[in-house]
Image (cartoon, rainbow, N blue to C red):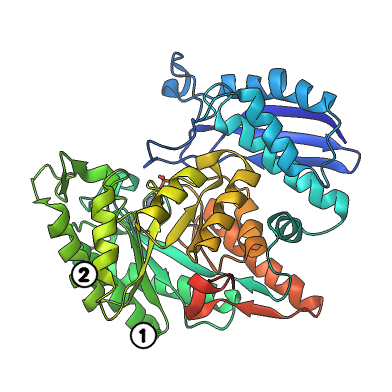
Amino acid sequence: YITSITAAQRLDSRGNPTVQVRLTTDKGTFTGLVPSGASTGIHEALELRDTSSTAYGGKGVKQAVLNVTNTIAPALIARYFDVETQLKEIDAFMCDLDGTKGKKKLGANAILGVSMACARAGAASLKIPLYEHLRLESGSLEAPYILPVPFFNVLNGGVHSGNTMAFQEIMLAPTGAQSITEAVQMGAETYHALKTVITKKFGPSATGIGDEGGFAPPISKPSEALDLLTEAVEKAGYTGKIQFAMDPASSEFFREANYNLGIKDKTSTKLTPDGLADLYRELIQKYPIVLLEDPFAEDDWSSWSGFMQKGKSLERMPEIVGDDLTVTNVERVKEAQEKGACNGLLLKINQIGTVSEAIAAANLAFSYGWGVFVSHRSGETTDDFIADLTVGLRTGHLKTGAPARGERVVKYNRLMDIEDELKARGEEVKYAGVDFRTAHGKVA
Ligand code: PGA
Ligand code: ZN
Protein backbone atom coordinates (compact mmCIF):
# COMPACT_ATOMS: atom_id res chain seq x y z
CA TYR A 1 0.00 0.00 0.00
CA ILE A 2 1.00 3.60 -0.53
CA THR A 3 2.09 5.30 2.67
CA SER A 4 3.11 8.70 1.33
CA ILE A 5 3.27 10.73 -1.87
CA THR A 6 5.32 13.90 -2.16
CA ALA A 7 6.04 16.13 -5.15
CA ALA A 8 8.46 18.90 -6.04
CA GLN A 9 9.30 21.31 -8.81
CA ARG A 10 12.50 20.28 -10.63
CA LEU A 11 14.11 21.18 -13.97
CA ASP A 12 13.78 19.50 -17.33
CA SER A 13 16.45 19.37 -20.06
CA ARG A 14 15.46 22.79 -21.42
CA GLY A 15 15.78 24.39 -18.00
CA ASN A 16 12.02 24.62 -17.51
CA PRO A 17 10.27 23.41 -14.36
CA THR A 18 8.69 19.99 -14.28
CA VAL A 19 6.96 17.74 -11.75
CA GLN A 20 8.86 15.16 -9.72
CA VAL A 21 6.84 12.68 -7.67
CA ARG A 22 8.12 10.45 -4.87
CA LEU A 23 5.83 7.67 -3.74
CA THR A 24 6.55 5.46 -0.75
CA THR A 25 5.29 1.97 0.05
CA ASP A 26 6.63 -0.61 2.51
CA LYS A 27 9.01 -1.69 -0.30
CA GLY A 28 10.72 1.68 -0.72
CA THR A 29 10.40 5.05 -2.42
CA PHE A 30 9.70 5.31 -6.15
CA THR A 31 9.90 8.31 -8.44
CA GLY A 32 8.35 9.67 -11.58
CA LEU A 33 9.72 12.66 -13.51
CA VAL A 34 7.45 14.15 -16.13
CA PRO A 35 8.63 15.23 -19.62
CA SER A 36 7.36 18.19 -21.64
CA GLY A 37 6.88 18.91 -25.35
CA ALA A 38 7.47 22.05 -27.43
CA SER A 39 5.58 21.12 -30.58
CA THR A 40 2.60 19.95 -28.57
CA GLY A 41 -0.62 18.88 -30.28
CA ILE A 42 -3.74 20.89 -29.52
CA HIS A 43 -5.58 17.69 -28.58
CA GLU A 44 -3.09 16.66 -25.87
CA ALA A 45 -4.07 16.47 -22.20
CA LEU A 46 -3.33 19.67 -20.28
CA GLU A 47 0.14 20.38 -18.94
CA LEU A 48 -0.66 22.63 -16.00
CA ARG A 49 1.65 25.67 -15.71
CA ASP A 50 1.58 28.69 -13.41
CA THR A 51 0.87 31.13 -16.21
CA SER A 52 -0.21 33.92 -13.88
CA SER A 53 3.13 33.95 -12.04
CA THR A 54 6.30 35.60 -13.34
CA ALA A 55 8.51 32.81 -11.91
CA TYR A 56 10.25 30.87 -14.69
CA GLY A 57 8.48 33.08 -17.22
CA GLY A 58 5.07 31.68 -16.31
CA LYS A 59 6.26 28.10 -16.75
CA GLY A 60 6.33 27.09 -13.09
CA VAL A 61 4.49 23.92 -12.02
CA LYS A 62 3.85 24.79 -8.38
CA GLN A 63 0.10 24.36 -8.73
CA ALA A 64 0.59 20.91 -10.30
CA VAL A 65 2.87 20.04 -7.38
CA LEU A 66 0.23 21.21 -4.92
CA ASN A 67 -2.38 19.17 -6.77
CA VAL A 68 -0.28 16.08 -6.10
CA THR A 69 0.40 16.77 -2.44
CA ASN A 70 -2.94 18.30 -1.42
CA THR A 71 -5.47 16.52 -3.62
CA ILE A 72 -4.14 13.32 -5.19
CA ALA A 73 -1.99 12.10 -2.29
CA PRO A 74 -4.61 12.10 0.50
CA ALA A 75 -7.32 10.68 -1.76
CA LEU A 76 -5.14 7.85 -3.10
CA ILE A 77 -3.61 6.91 0.25
CA ALA A 78 -7.08 6.71 1.85
CA ARG A 79 -8.16 4.14 -0.74
CA TYR A 80 -5.52 1.50 0.11
CA PHE A 81 -5.00 0.57 -3.52
CA ASP A 82 -2.75 -2.42 -4.17
CA VAL A 83 0.09 -1.16 -6.39
CA GLU A 84 0.86 -4.73 -7.51
CA THR A 85 -2.44 -5.33 -9.27
CA GLN A 86 -4.35 -2.06 -9.42
CA LEU A 87 -2.46 0.34 -11.69
CA LYS A 88 -5.52 0.64 -13.95
CA GLU A 89 -7.79 1.34 -10.99
CA ILE A 90 -5.35 3.90 -9.56
CA ASP A 91 -5.13 5.69 -12.92
CA ALA A 92 -8.92 5.61 -13.39
CA PHE A 93 -9.36 6.96 -9.85
CA MET A 94 -7.09 9.93 -10.62
CA CYS A 95 -8.97 10.59 -13.85
CA ASP A 96 -12.25 10.65 -11.90
CA LEU A 97 -10.72 12.88 -9.26
CA ASP A 98 -9.84 15.32 -12.03
CA GLY A 99 -13.24 14.94 -13.61
CA THR A 100 -12.46 16.66 -16.93
CA LYS A 101 -11.69 15.14 -20.31
CA GLY A 102 -8.23 16.62 -20.83
CA LYS A 103 -7.07 16.50 -17.18
CA LYS A 104 -7.63 20.22 -17.07
CA LYS A 105 -8.21 20.48 -13.35
CA LEU A 106 -5.29 18.62 -11.77
CA GLY A 107 -3.01 18.66 -14.83
CA ALA A 108 -1.69 15.69 -16.80
CA ASN A 109 1.79 16.50 -15.45
CA ALA A 110 0.57 16.05 -11.84
CA ILE A 111 -1.30 12.81 -12.59
CA LEU A 112 1.39 11.21 -14.78
CA GLY A 113 4.14 11.59 -12.16
CA VAL A 114 2.03 9.60 -9.70
CA SER A 115 1.09 7.00 -12.31
CA MET A 116 4.75 6.37 -13.23
CA ALA A 117 5.78 6.10 -9.59
CA CYS A 118 2.90 3.66 -8.95
CA ALA A 119 4.05 1.45 -11.84
CA ARG A 120 7.55 1.37 -10.37
CA ALA A 121 6.19 0.61 -6.90
CA GLY A 122 4.14 -2.24 -8.35
CA ALA A 123 7.14 -3.78 -10.09
CA ALA A 124 9.24 -3.57 -6.92
CA SER A 125 6.48 -5.11 -4.86
CA LEU A 126 6.18 -8.01 -7.32
CA LYS A 127 10.00 -8.27 -7.34
CA ILE A 128 10.09 -8.09 -11.13
CA PRO A 129 11.70 -5.59 -13.51
CA LEU A 130 9.54 -2.66 -14.61
CA TYR A 131 9.45 -3.90 -18.23
CA GLU A 132 8.01 -7.20 -17.07
CA HIS A 133 5.39 -5.50 -14.92
CA LEU A 134 4.37 -3.32 -17.87
CA ARG A 135 4.24 -6.41 -20.11
CA LEU A 136 1.85 -8.09 -17.67
CA GLU A 137 -0.24 -4.91 -17.46
CA SER A 138 -0.51 -4.79 -21.25
CA GLY A 139 -1.14 -8.48 -21.87
CA SER A 140 1.68 -8.48 -24.39
CA LEU A 141 3.23 -11.77 -25.52
CA GLU A 142 5.63 -13.35 -23.07
CA ALA A 143 8.64 -14.59 -25.00
CA PRO A 144 10.88 -13.54 -26.49
CA TYR A 145 11.45 -10.00 -25.34
CA ILE A 146 12.10 -7.73 -28.29
CA LEU A 147 14.60 -4.89 -28.09
CA PRO A 148 13.60 -1.90 -30.23
CA VAL A 149 15.30 -0.23 -33.17
CA PRO A 150 16.43 3.09 -31.68
CA PHE A 151 15.59 6.03 -33.95
CA PHE A 152 18.29 8.64 -33.33
CA ASN A 153 17.26 12.21 -34.04
CA VAL A 154 20.57 13.63 -35.33
CA LEU A 155 19.39 16.76 -37.19
CA ASN A 156 17.09 19.16 -35.35
CA GLY A 157 14.90 21.80 -36.99
CA GLY A 158 11.42 23.19 -36.45
CA VAL A 159 10.75 24.57 -32.99
CA HIS A 160 13.64 22.49 -31.59
CA SER A 161 16.46 24.58 -33.06
CA GLY A 162 17.47 27.98 -34.37
CA ASN A 163 18.27 27.03 -37.95
CA THR A 164 15.85 27.66 -40.83
CA MET A 165 14.77 24.05 -41.45
CA ALA A 166 10.99 23.73 -41.10
CA PHE A 167 11.13 19.95 -40.68
CA GLN A 168 11.66 19.17 -37.00
CA GLU A 169 13.46 15.82 -36.88
CA ILE A 170 15.67 13.81 -39.23
CA MET A 171 16.48 10.41 -37.76
CA LEU A 172 18.83 7.45 -38.23
CA ALA A 173 17.42 3.94 -37.78
CA PRO A 174 20.08 1.19 -37.52
CA THR A 175 17.76 -1.55 -38.75
CA GLY A 176 20.71 -3.68 -39.89
CA ALA A 177 22.14 -4.14 -36.39
CA GLN A 178 21.95 -7.48 -34.57
CA SER A 179 21.28 -6.08 -31.10
CA ILE A 180 20.41 -2.83 -29.35
CA THR A 181 24.03 -2.59 -28.20
CA GLU A 182 25.28 -2.74 -31.77
CA ALA A 183 22.57 -0.32 -32.90
CA VAL A 184 23.69 2.23 -30.30
CA GLN A 185 27.30 1.91 -31.48
CA MET A 186 26.24 2.38 -35.11
CA GLY A 187 24.17 5.41 -34.17
CA ALA A 188 26.91 7.03 -32.09
CA GLU A 189 29.60 6.44 -34.71
CA THR A 190 27.39 7.92 -37.42
CA TYR A 191 26.53 10.89 -35.17
CA HIS A 192 30.25 11.63 -34.89
CA ALA A 193 30.77 11.13 -38.63
CA LEU A 194 27.93 13.61 -39.18
CA LYS A 195 29.70 16.14 -36.97
CA THR A 196 32.79 15.82 -39.18
CA VAL A 197 30.72 16.21 -42.35
CA ILE A 198 29.01 19.33 -40.95
CA THR A 199 32.31 20.84 -39.79
CA LYS A 200 33.80 20.38 -43.26
CA LYS A 201 30.82 21.93 -44.99
CA PHE A 202 29.83 24.73 -42.66
CA GLY A 203 32.74 25.21 -40.24
CA PRO A 204 33.03 24.30 -36.56
CA SER A 205 30.51 26.91 -35.40
CA ALA A 206 27.78 24.95 -37.19
CA THR A 207 27.98 21.93 -34.89
CA GLY A 208 25.76 23.40 -32.18
CA ILE A 209 22.83 21.24 -31.22
CA GLY A 210 19.07 21.48 -30.84
CA ASP A 211 16.75 20.45 -28.01
CA GLU A 212 17.03 16.71 -28.66
CA GLY A 213 20.81 16.63 -29.06
CA GLY A 214 20.86 16.55 -32.86
CA PHE A 215 22.93 19.02 -34.88
CA ALA A 216 21.28 22.14 -36.27
CA PRO A 217 23.43 23.30 -39.20
CA PRO A 218 22.33 26.21 -41.42
CA ILE A 219 20.22 24.21 -43.84
CA SER A 220 16.58 24.60 -44.73
CA LYS A 221 15.63 21.95 -47.30
CA PRO A 222 14.86 18.37 -46.20
CA SER A 223 16.97 17.06 -49.11
CA GLU A 224 20.01 18.90 -47.72
CA ALA A 225 19.44 17.14 -44.39
CA LEU A 226 19.07 13.72 -46.00
CA ASP A 227 22.19 14.30 -48.12
CA LEU A 228 24.18 15.07 -44.96
CA LEU A 229 22.89 11.84 -43.40
CA THR A 230 23.72 9.83 -46.51
CA GLU A 231 27.27 11.12 -46.42
CA ALA A 232 27.65 10.47 -42.68
CA VAL A 233 26.33 6.92 -42.93
CA GLU A 234 28.71 6.21 -45.80
CA LYS A 235 31.63 7.71 -43.90
CA ALA A 236 30.82 5.55 -40.87
CA GLY A 237 30.64 2.47 -43.10
CA TYR A 238 26.97 1.60 -42.53
CA THR A 239 25.41 2.15 -45.95
CA GLY A 240 22.47 -0.24 -46.31
CA LYS A 241 22.40 -0.96 -42.58
CA ILE A 242 21.08 2.39 -41.39
CA GLN A 243 17.83 3.76 -42.74
CA PHE A 244 16.20 7.18 -42.29
CA ALA A 245 13.06 8.63 -40.72
CA MET A 246 11.51 12.08 -40.56
CA ASP A 247 9.16 13.94 -38.27
CA PRO A 248 8.33 17.19 -40.07
CA ALA A 249 5.90 17.99 -37.18
CA SER A 250 3.90 19.75 -39.84
CA SER A 251 1.20 21.22 -37.57
CA GLU A 252 3.87 23.80 -36.69
CA PHE A 253 4.08 25.18 -40.23
CA PHE A 254 0.48 24.72 -41.32
CA ARG A 255 -1.13 28.08 -42.11
CA GLU A 256 -4.51 28.65 -43.76
CA ALA A 257 -4.74 25.26 -45.46
CA ASN A 258 -1.14 25.40 -46.73
CA TYR A 259 2.26 24.30 -45.49
CA ASN A 260 4.93 27.00 -45.30
CA LEU A 261 8.41 25.47 -45.42
CA GLY A 262 9.88 28.98 -45.24
CA ILE A 263 8.28 29.74 -41.90
CA LYS A 264 11.55 30.07 -40.01
CA ASP A 265 13.41 32.42 -42.35
CA LYS A 266 10.26 34.42 -43.02
CA THR A 267 10.40 33.67 -46.72
CA SER A 268 7.19 32.28 -48.03
CA THR A 269 7.74 28.80 -49.41
CA LYS A 270 4.15 27.70 -49.40
CA LEU A 271 3.10 24.26 -50.54
CA THR A 272 -0.45 23.02 -50.92
CA PRO A 273 -1.17 19.70 -49.16
CA ASP A 274 -0.80 17.99 -52.56
CA GLY A 275 2.49 19.77 -53.17
CA LEU A 276 3.80 18.60 -49.81
CA ALA A 277 2.63 15.05 -50.51
CA ASP A 278 4.53 15.13 -53.82
CA LEU A 279 7.65 16.30 -51.98
CA TYR A 280 7.34 13.37 -49.53
CA ARG A 281 6.95 10.88 -52.35
CA GLU A 282 10.04 12.29 -54.09
CA LEU A 283 12.07 11.98 -50.89
CA ILE A 284 10.76 8.45 -50.23
CA GLN A 285 11.89 7.37 -53.71
CA LYS A 286 15.31 8.94 -53.38
CA TYR A 287 16.28 8.06 -49.79
CA PRO A 288 15.83 4.96 -47.60
CA ILE A 289 13.03 6.47 -45.49
CA VAL A 290 11.25 3.86 -43.38
CA LEU A 291 9.09 6.07 -41.16
CA LEU A 292 7.32 9.39 -41.64
CA GLU A 293 5.63 11.04 -38.66
CA ASP A 294 3.06 13.85 -38.73
CA PRO A 295 3.40 14.48 -42.47
CA PHE A 296 0.25 16.60 -42.26
CA ALA A 297 -1.34 18.81 -39.62
CA GLU A 298 -3.32 17.54 -36.65
CA ASP A 299 -6.77 18.18 -38.16
CA ASP A 300 -5.95 18.01 -41.87
CA TRP A 301 -7.55 14.54 -42.04
CA SER A 302 -8.17 14.42 -45.77
CA SER A 303 -4.48 14.96 -46.59
CA TRP A 304 -3.54 12.06 -44.32
CA SER A 305 -6.12 9.72 -45.84
CA GLY A 306 -5.26 10.74 -49.40
CA PHE A 307 -1.57 10.14 -48.79
CA MET A 308 -2.22 6.67 -47.38
CA GLN A 309 -4.48 5.81 -50.34
CA LYS A 310 -1.93 6.89 -52.91
CA GLY A 311 0.81 5.09 -51.01
CA LYS A 312 -0.77 1.75 -51.86
CA SER A 313 0.47 2.08 -55.42
CA LEU A 314 4.01 3.04 -54.37
CA GLU A 315 6.72 0.44 -54.50
CA ARG A 316 7.91 1.31 -51.02
CA MET A 317 5.92 3.14 -48.39
CA PRO A 318 7.29 4.08 -44.97
CA GLU A 319 5.29 3.60 -41.78
CA ILE A 320 3.03 6.64 -41.43
CA VAL A 321 2.92 7.65 -37.76
CA GLY A 322 0.39 9.90 -36.06
CA ASP A 323 1.65 12.12 -33.24
CA ASP A 324 -0.22 15.45 -32.97
CA LEU A 325 -2.92 13.67 -34.98
CA THR A 326 -3.56 10.91 -32.46
CA VAL A 327 -2.06 12.23 -29.18
CA THR A 328 -1.94 8.78 -27.50
CA ASN A 329 -5.72 9.02 -27.14
CA VAL A 330 -7.99 6.06 -27.95
CA GLU A 331 -10.71 8.34 -29.38
CA ARG A 332 -8.29 9.93 -31.84
CA VAL A 333 -6.72 6.53 -32.66
CA LYS A 334 -10.21 5.18 -33.49
CA GLU A 335 -10.94 8.17 -35.68
CA ALA A 336 -7.62 7.79 -37.51
CA GLN A 337 -8.37 4.12 -38.18
CA GLU A 338 -11.87 4.93 -39.47
CA LYS A 339 -10.43 7.54 -41.80
CA GLY A 340 -7.50 5.40 -42.91
CA ALA A 341 -5.17 8.22 -41.90
CA CYS A 342 -2.07 6.36 -40.70
CA ASN A 343 -0.68 2.96 -39.75
CA GLY A 344 1.49 3.87 -36.79
CA LEU A 345 0.93 5.46 -33.38
CA LEU A 346 3.44 7.67 -31.62
CA LEU A 347 3.17 6.80 -27.94
CA LYS A 348 3.93 9.65 -25.52
CA ILE A 349 2.78 9.01 -21.98
CA ASN A 350 2.38 12.68 -21.10
CA GLN A 351 0.08 13.33 -24.08
CA ILE A 352 -2.61 11.37 -22.25
CA GLY A 353 -1.39 11.57 -18.66
CA THR A 354 -1.48 8.03 -17.24
CA VAL A 355 0.50 4.87 -17.93
CA SER A 356 -2.58 2.67 -18.28
CA GLU A 357 -4.30 4.95 -20.78
CA ALA A 358 -1.10 4.96 -22.86
CA ILE A 359 -1.06 1.15 -22.75
CA ALA A 360 -4.73 1.11 -23.85
CA ALA A 361 -3.91 3.37 -26.80
CA ALA A 362 -1.01 1.08 -27.79
CA ASN A 363 -3.21 -2.02 -27.57
CA LEU A 364 -5.90 -0.43 -29.70
CA ALA A 365 -3.30 0.50 -32.32
CA PHE A 366 -1.92 -3.07 -32.23
CA SER A 367 -5.44 -4.44 -32.77
CA TYR A 368 -5.63 -2.45 -36.02
CA GLY A 369 -2.31 -3.92 -37.14
CA TRP A 370 -0.55 -0.57 -36.71
CA GLY A 371 2.97 -0.09 -35.46
CA VAL A 372 3.57 1.63 -32.12
CA PHE A 373 6.52 4.03 -31.84
CA VAL A 374 7.37 4.98 -28.24
CA SER A 375 8.65 8.53 -27.81
CA HIS A 376 10.35 10.91 -25.42
CA ARG A 377 9.56 14.66 -25.45
CA SER A 378 11.84 17.49 -26.52
CA GLY A 379 11.89 18.64 -22.88
CA GLU A 380 13.11 15.52 -21.10
CA THR A 381 14.42 14.38 -17.74
CA THR A 382 16.80 11.68 -16.60
CA ASP A 383 13.83 9.38 -16.03
CA ASP A 384 14.23 6.22 -18.15
CA PHE A 385 10.66 4.91 -17.82
CA ILE A 386 10.00 4.74 -21.57
CA ALA A 387 12.84 2.25 -22.14
CA ASP A 388 11.03 -0.31 -20.00
CA LEU A 389 7.70 0.62 -21.56
CA THR A 390 9.07 -0.06 -25.05
CA VAL A 391 10.36 -3.51 -24.10
CA GLY A 392 7.27 -4.38 -22.05
CA LEU A 393 4.85 -3.49 -24.85
CA ARG A 394 7.09 -5.04 -27.52
CA THR A 395 6.75 -2.03 -29.76
CA GLY A 396 9.91 -2.79 -31.75
CA HIS A 397 10.93 0.85 -32.14
CA LEU A 398 11.33 4.03 -30.12
CA LYS A 399 12.77 7.50 -30.51
CA THR A 400 14.53 9.27 -27.70
CA GLY A 401 16.81 11.78 -29.39
CA ALA A 402 20.45 11.82 -30.37
CA PRO A 403 22.94 9.27 -29.03
CA ALA A 404 24.26 12.12 -26.87
CA ARG A 405 23.14 14.31 -23.91
CA GLY A 406 22.29 12.74 -20.54
CA GLU A 407 18.52 12.91 -20.70
CA ARG A 408 18.57 11.06 -24.06
CA VAL A 409 21.32 8.48 -23.47
CA VAL A 410 19.84 7.42 -20.14
CA LYS A 411 17.08 5.68 -22.14
CA TYR A 412 19.46 4.05 -24.63
CA ASN A 413 21.71 2.95 -21.76
CA ARG A 414 18.75 1.42 -19.94
CA LEU A 415 17.83 -0.54 -23.08
CA MET A 416 21.36 -1.96 -23.25
CA ASP A 417 21.09 -2.83 -19.54
CA ILE A 418 17.85 -4.70 -20.22
CA GLU A 419 19.48 -6.58 -23.11
CA ASP A 420 22.41 -7.60 -20.89
CA GLU A 421 20.10 -8.55 -18.02
CA LEU A 422 17.92 -10.78 -20.20
CA LYS A 423 20.96 -12.48 -21.69
CA ALA A 424 22.44 -13.03 -18.23
CA ARG A 425 19.18 -14.71 -17.22
CA GLY A 426 19.54 -17.01 -20.21
CA GLU A 427 16.40 -15.66 -21.89
CA GLU A 428 15.95 -15.43 -25.62
CA VAL A 429 16.39 -11.82 -26.71
CA LYS A 430 15.50 -10.51 -30.14
CA TYR A 431 16.35 -7.25 -31.85
CA ALA A 432 13.44 -5.93 -33.92
CA GLY A 433 15.54 -5.01 -37.00
CA VAL A 434 13.87 -4.24 -40.34
CA ASP A 435 10.55 -5.66 -39.14
CA PHE A 436 10.29 -3.10 -36.33
CA ARG A 437 6.72 -2.12 -37.23
CA THR A 438 5.28 -5.60 -36.81
CA ALA A 439 7.64 -6.87 -34.09
CA HIS A 440 4.78 -6.91 -31.59
CA GLY A 441 3.39 -9.94 -33.40
CA LYS A 442 -0.19 -8.77 -33.19
CA VAL A 443 -0.66 -7.97 -36.84
CA ALA A 444 -4.07 -9.02 -38.03
P1 PGA B 1 7.81 17.62 -28.76
O1 PGA B 1 8.46 16.99 -30.06
O2 PGA B 1 8.20 16.80 -27.61
O3 PGA B 1 8.39 19.02 -28.75
O4 PGA B 1 6.32 17.63 -29.00
C1 PGA B 1 8.46 15.61 -30.31
C2 PGA B 1 7.64 15.24 -31.49
O5 PGA B 1 7.00 16.10 -32.14
O6 PGA B 1 7.59 14.06 -31.83
ZN1 ZN C 1 6.20 14.31 -33.61
Q: Which residue does the image show at 51% across and 46% down from the upper left?
A: 330
Q: Nearer the viewer, residue 182 or 342?
A: 342
Q: Is residue 37 left or right of residue 278?
A: right
Specify the quadrant that holds the N terminus: top right
Question: Is the CB of the residue bearing disc 2 within 8 angstroms of ligand 2?
Answer: no
Above or below, comparing residue 358 to residue 101 in the picture:
below
Q: Residue furthest right?
A: 26
The local secondary structure at tag 2 comes to helix
Q: Amino acid at mark 2?
A: Arg
Which corner quadrant of the image does residue 79 belong to? top right
Distance of mark 1 from mark 2, alpha carbons? Answer: 21 Å
Q: Amino acid at mark 1?
A: Thr
Q: Is residue 229 left or right of residue 30?
A: left
Q: Which residue is mark 1?
A: 239
Above or below, comparing residue 350 to residue 305 in the picture:
above
Q: Which residue does the image show at 86% across and 37% down from the upper left?
A: 25
Q: Which residue does the image show at 48% across and 77% down from the upper left?
A: 186
Q: Is residue 207 left or right of residue 8?
A: left
Q: Where's residue 169, x and y in %? A: 34, 57
Q: Where's residue 279, x and y in %? A: 17, 64
Q: Which residue is mark 2?
A: 281
Q: Is residue 74 visible?
A: yes
Earlier residue among tags 1 and 2: 1
Above or below, comparing residue 413 to residue 427 in the picture:
above
